[in-house]
Structures are given as C-alpha cells and as structure tokens.
Amino acid sequence: MGKTLFLENARKLRYEAGWVAVHRDGDPRPVLLRADELDCIVVDGKAAFISTYLLDELAARGCSVIFTDSRHMPASILMPLTAATIDTNGRVLTQMSWGAWPRKMLWKKIIECKLDNQANVLAGSGHEREAERLASYAGEVRADDSTGREAAGARRYFQALFGADFIRLPHAGATNSALDYGYSILLSHTACRIAAKGYLNQVGIHHHSKTNPYNLACDLMEPFRPLIDRKVELEHPRELTPSMKRLLASTLADRIPYGLGSYRVSDAIDLWVDGCLRVMEGVGDADGISAPGMP
C-alpha cells in the first residue's frame, strides 16, 4: 500500500487479475498498476467508465476512490463501509459509549500535535516569532481544548504563512482551493483506515455535525494538515493545476518521523489512527501516543 493514482481524462478503468487497467484515448494498450499497491485513486473528469468489479476489488483492499466535480475539486469518496474480517458490530457498540473524559483528553493531544506541526511549518518558512507563539500555545492546551488554543493559533498561523489578508474559506482563490484539495486526500485515507478497523466515521470525538459523514476522520486527520500547508506555501499556486494536484496527492507517499522511526504518511496515519482508537477503547492514555512530525 502507499501509492496515490491521479487520473486525468481516463476513458476506462477495469480490474484484470490483480491489476488496475487504465485505458486512455489514443493509446491502444492500457497502463497496468498493481491493485495491492494503491491507497487512493483520484478520478479527475466525468468521461471515465469504471467497472463495478474494479470498485469492489478496490474496496476489499481498503483503497478509496475520489471523484471530482465540474471545478475539478473532490466531490465524493467511495470507500468500504466496514471491515469484513473483524467484530464490526462490537466495535460500533463500544464506540457509541465512548466516555467524555477520554474524548476530551484525546482532543487535547490532537490539538497539541497540530499546533506543534504548525509551529514547525512557520519556523521552516522563516516566521520564527509566530512559530514560538504557536509552540507556546501547544503547551497551553487543556482537556477538550477548553482554552481555545486551536482557534487562536489558526488566526496567527494562516496569516503568517499566506499573508495578512488571507482568510481561510473553502474554494476562495487558488491557495484555499489547493488546501481543500490536499486536505481531501488526507481525509479520504484517514476515513478508509477508520472503516477498515471496524468503526463508524460518522461518530467523532469532537466533530459532531449531523451532515458530516466523516466526523471521526476530521478529528483524527488534524495533525497531518500542516503537511499540505507546507506544500501549498512553497508552491504559491496561482491556480490549481493538474501538476499541483499530483503534488498534493503524492503527500501520502512522503516520509515523516513518527515515534522512533520514519514512515510514509499513509502508514503514519494508520499508526496514528490505531493509537487514537486504542485510547478510546481504554488501552493506554492519550499522552502515550506517538505524535506524527514534519519532514
């Protein structure tokens, strides 16, 4: 696992004995990719025919498929609902009774990690003073982020990184569109890992929107967002080009420090999700989870 496949103007995708066959206009021979090596496929365009056989095989392997809209932005995600080889019913029942205190302490850990990584991004971009401020915010986080350090940090962070006039709004300009696109890649992978472990994405520890089917994934992906922020800040995109999309989609294959080792982002997300879910199941505490770092 680990590769993200970005497809533009593909005509047909089908399954062929363990391979994903990609047919393109003007090319009589398909491109073949090992299905077992794919974490995510991004289908950018509305003309592609995709066999249900292929979708079933991808779901069985835990590979998500993202479809884009007319603006070439992610519009929907196809992913397995649950894992087929574990006690999904038992885990869902346990999830519905997760206690308030473990939720609050895990959210504290998540925000600490996010602020630390944001501080790392700012330091690498030459914003030392703001980096120190965010690092201090990380040390001030309390249970359930009752001190509001995430929101305070976000205001300073985005304006330091992208300019004093920058406002974080969905689809508002090239920078926001690039952030949205990159975050959707992280979200789809995190959601797949949660489902593969037998839990419901709809039931979060902090996010509780009735209209968000990925509340838990939105919670657990937070410390990884700065990986996307750094790429967008370095590229300064004037528009969300196909090459920029490929760069953002490749984030899952980047290597980052996690615990005592170095892992691909896709594998680090899996380890992080596993650690967070163990805390919610009463195995260990939030402070003991290894934190994902920045490359």
Image (spheres, helix red, strand yellow):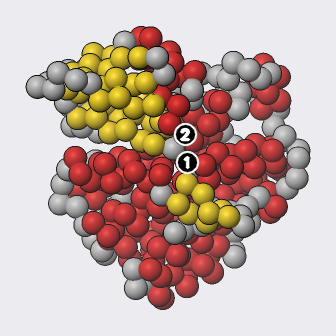
Pointer 1 local density, CA inside 10 Å: few below 14, some 14–19, many at least 20: many
Pointer 2 local density, CA inside 10 Å: few below 14, some 14–19, many at least 20: some
The residue under label 2 is: 1
The residue under label 1 is: 266
- Vertical relation: 138 (above or below) 197: below
Q: Quadrant of the N terminus?
A: top right
Q: Position of residue 249 (x, y in %)?
A: 38, 47
The structure residue drawn at horizontal position 55% and vertical position 85%, both measured from the top left corner, is 132
Q: Position of residue 129 (x, y in %)?
A: 48, 88
Q: Position of residue 31 (x, y in %)?
A: 29, 29
Q: Is residue 13 left or right of residue 216?
A: left
Q: Quadrant of residue 20?
A: top left
Q: Quadrant of residue 159?
A: bottom left
Q: In this view of the protein, which residue sits in the foreground, 111 or 84?
A: 84
The structure residue drawn at horizontal position 77% and vertical position 32%, both measured from the top left corner, is 95
Q: In this view of the protein, which residue sits in the foreground, 51 or 154?
A: 51
- Vertical relation: 199 (above or below) 85: below
Q: In this view of the protein, which residue sits in the foreground, 253 or 280?
A: 253
- The answer to whether mark 2 and mark 1 are in CB contact below 8 A is yes
Which secondary structure lies at badge 1?
helix
Q: Amino acid at mark 1?
A: Ser
Q: Amino acid at mark 2?
A: Met
The structure residue drawn at horizontal position 51% and vertical position 44%, both measured from the top left corner, is 2
Q: Is residue 132 left or right of residue 22?
A: right
Q: CA distance from mark 2 to mark 1?
A: 8 Å
